[in-house]
Image (tube, rainbow, N blue to C red):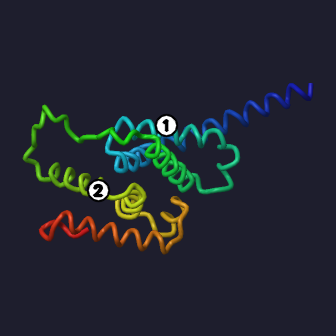
Amino acid sequence: MASVRWGAARRREHAARQAEFTAFVEATAPGLRRTAYLLCRDWHLAQDLTQTTFARMYASWGRIRHTTNPQAYSCRVLMNVVFDQNRRRSAAEVVLAELPEAAQHRSDDTTELHVALLQALATLPLRDQAIVVLRHWEDQSVETVASALGVSVSVVKMRNARALTKLRALLGRDFVRI
């Protein structure tokens, strides 16, 4: 009789943990997918990277759900997944924002601004891209970015300053100040 009660309690605990993880995924998926996109400039790859992040988190959800900040932990896992994917990617692979044969430009200034920013961002090393995206797009603190990337605060500050200087040089004086 005790084993029946024990089994029911374990099922309820498992169901509660599943519901908690599902709620976490629903709340954080859009932000993680956007961050992944800004680093890889491919929505399909960003979706794959986000799913890999959640799969890795699910494997250890029982351990991390109460002991750490799941939001910060997910950002750290995503950065590791992005860096792993970048190391595996072939050097011959080229990601383009548009298909070369169907180059139709919209006259919309926001589209041109978006493309110019993504192209300039793509010239930075991946770790610098991650720092700029997390600091300025996701509006995270220096300490949070350092924790997510596993580097010191001074490294984040130094690389951020250098990356912004390079972006300003690429985008020119007429561009809105970053």
Q: Residue at x 50, y 72 (%)?
A: 153
| 11 is higher (above) or lower (below) than 155 | above
Q: Foreground residue, 98 or 145?
A: 98
Numbered disc total? 2
Q: Position of residue 108 (x, y in %)?
A: 10, 48
Classify residue 89 by image quadrant. Answer: top left
Q: What label sits on residue 123 in the rendered view?
A: 2
| 137 is higher (above) or lower (below) than 31 | below
Q: Position of residue 141 (x, y in %)?
A: 46, 68
Q: Foreground residue, 13 or 144?
A: 144
Q: Secondary structure at mark 1?
A: helix
Q: Residue at x 49, y 51 (%)?
A: 79
Q: Residue at x 28, y 71 (%)?
A: 165
The residue indicated by pointer 1 is 51
Q: Amino acid at mark 1?
A: Gln
Classify residue 123 by image quadrant. Answer: bottom left
Spot the residue most to the front: 92
